[in-house]
Amino acid sequence: MPAFPEAEYADRLAKTREEMERRSLDALLVTDPANMYYLTGYDAWSFYVPQAVIVPRAEEPPIWVGRGMDAPSAVITTRLPPERILTYADDYVESPTKHPMQHIAKVLAENAWERARVGVESDAYYFTARQLQVLQESLPEAEFPDAYLLVNWIRTVKSALEIEYMRQAARILERVMRVAVDAVNVGTRECDAAALISQAQISGTPDYGGDAPAAFPAILSGEKAGTPHSSWSDAPFRTDTATCLELSGCRLRYHCAMSRTVYLGTPPDEIKRLAEVVREGMSDALAAVGPGRQCQEVEAAWRQTIGRAGYVKPSRIGYSIGVNYPPNWADHTASLRAGDTTEMVPDMTFHLMLGMWMDGWGYEASETFRVTEGGYELFADFPQKLFVKE
Amino acid sequence: MPAFPEAEYADRLAKTREEMERRSLDALLVTDPANMYYLTGYDAWSFYVPQAVIVPRAEEPPIWVGRGMDAPSAVITTRLPPERILTYADDYVESPTKHPMQHIAKVLAENAWERARVGVESDAYYFTARQLQVLQESLPEAEFPDAYLLVNWIRTVKSALEIEYMRQAARILERVMRVAVDAVNVGTRECDAAALISQAQISGTPDYGGDAPAAFPAILSGEKAGTPHSSWSDAPFRTDTATCLELSGCRLRYHCAMSRTVYLGTPPDEIKRLAEVVREGMSDALAAVGPGRQCQEVEAAWRQTIGRAGYVKPSRIGYSIGVNYPPNWADHTASLRAGDTTEMVPDMTFHLMLGMWMDGWGYEASETFRVTEGGYELFADFPQKLFVKE
């Protein structure tokens, strides 16, 4: 069964239709797996083949269209009526002569959208250039205006139950980070630490299990502590190195993320100093969080603090976070950075990610927080410091 | 350092250029992360933002273009000269006003491809509809012919070292499947089994660590054994149910996959009968593998065998497998199915995936094999049977 009550899906669809109305869209072709999940509950690792949820502007149930073998997943994970679960034959998959979007176009045509305005998520993962071309070739009289992030912006403000799932993810995350800090030791292979972290992520807590996070554990050790998205290796952790850990807990596809740094050996003054500056910057950034304030104010507060200490961070310091599938847990809407004038409202949730990737070393600390009426609330409870193992 | 010697990358680039020549492409914009890795060694979890490797038709090193913070990963994981590692500023990321493809277009223009024929991987994951639009808007005099799968087809025939990495993945996989079969027990939560499986995948063997597989463990239990891509839950395994396990070992991004089924309780005759038919079908399918034979012959042999027993499988029974990133480990080239006339040659590698998803139950058995001069060779050594725990 879906993770939310029917009324919550109805509310999400109503908000989506309101925005469709505003943009004069007759239908919305939702292909982002997180948005398909958000609007209907559909949950399966099937997003490696084309699939879609079509939201009509009219008050009718959405239509799920996907590969034949995935229809039973739609039956199990959504409340869609059976006649709104439609499939294409298996020989459309990775075919040199047919394309699944031809079938999805046929479904659009059969539902009177042959000459309609059908919004598409033009920059969403998995909505490829070819998919749009096939739609355009198949329905030359339809229009496909861009509706990228239409649903994501609705997702940006969380419901009480979404916040609850993120809190559960935070409980998982606290265990995960404890396992991670304990696992980083001189001589231990990076892959063995990653393995224990992944186990903790998926096992979850005795009360609720973990889900597959949208990104694998990021374990940046030694000179790789300066490369934010590198992979673990099977080399052992070495003495006199820092290891940055960017990890998540994931519950029912909702994420809570956190970064910490472990130093093996006696930390040099420069990393101790940076850790202290980041701690101050975190505190000042969080103090700028609250309803009515703009996202860029959070970054400005951080920038001012670290600037006084002589540091510069050229990248954004955070982003809206919540429900997602690989490869990324961000909502792809608001960012904490200069120029982002998004006004914060209660129950927006952000990953405040203070990654300082220096030349051949690095330091990371991050927190996931919720905007509250009075300011902010951190999801996870875990010491904010440089973890030193001498 | 990259996982392959320089000569192997040179060979891959030479084959790519040969095909570019044939198609009159002046440059190839490679955006599929597996193809970027295959051609240069570039390896990072950065494919959630636009990035590319540009292969010139001329004998010059490829150009890597990506986000600023990911350039150090390009320095560490490739042998590209520093002047061929180019970056865009962080404010291009998830920006409402700028797009990273504008910067990539600028790089194309600065390298004399402003009016050139630049092949694009139009149906590859992560190459979105918007990305192509931005390229076309930025370089209106250039052409962007489809070059989807150009590199994937080269990848389809593996080198000796690629086969060696797949063998290492198979050693990991044998351990993973043993852990999995042991972990499925009445009362154990699905998530706890998934956690142990993931740990085994990433930890690997004492000799070499595992990598992040392109798909999480598929654990299909009870009625979900009929839904091939569903997720684990935190419900416990129940007695009198089958659990299908589709798992992989991953080594340096190379995959070896295997499926097995565990029955908890006394298996009904219908699943025992199906298991026997699948075993015969597997044997007959493999007997049809060999150089000079077509992919469709493998499926035909299978279909004939299971048809005699009264079974039908509406989906393909396998695909080329090898190096990949999430969300899928297939090469997306040859499939084992009716109509696929791809001629097998030695060192092609396939995942022969016999998933029988019935109404509310299912049975899976699969193997990854290599085409040899004399026929085939299975990568992993693991009993092919229904595992019963009474």
Image (tube, coloured by chain):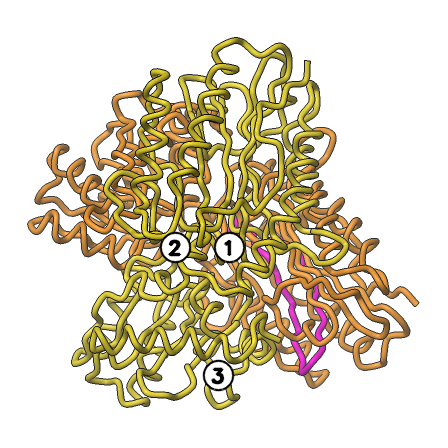
Chain colours: A orange, B yellow
Q: Residues within 10 Å of mark 2 (few under 14, many from 20)?
A: many
Amino acid type at circle 3 is: Ile
The span picked out in magenta is A344-368
Residue that mark 2 sits on: A125
Q: Quadrant of residue A116?
A: top left
- Badge 3 and badge 1 both on one subunit: no
Q: Position of residue B281 (x, y in %)?
A: 42, 28
Residue type, numbered disc 1: Asn
A76 or A388, nearer to the observer: A76
* Same subunit, tags 3 and 2: no
Q: Is residue A345 left or right of residue A381?
A: left
Q: Quadrant of the N terminus of chain B?
A: bottom right
> In the figure, residue B338 lies in which quadrant?
top left
Q: State if disc 2 and disc 1 touch (CB < 8 Å).
A: yes
Residue type at mark 2 is Tyr
Q: Residues within 10 Å of mark 1 (few under 14, many from 20)?
A: many
First reached walking from the N terminus: tag 1 or tag 2: 2
Q: On the picture, is B267 further left or further right than B27? A: right
Q: For mark 1, what is the residue?
A: A328
Q: Is residue B209 visible?
A: yes
Q: Is residue B98 visible?
A: no
Q: Which residue is mark 3?
A: B85
- Is A154 or A149 nearer to us in this picture? A149
Give the chain of mark 1. Answer: A
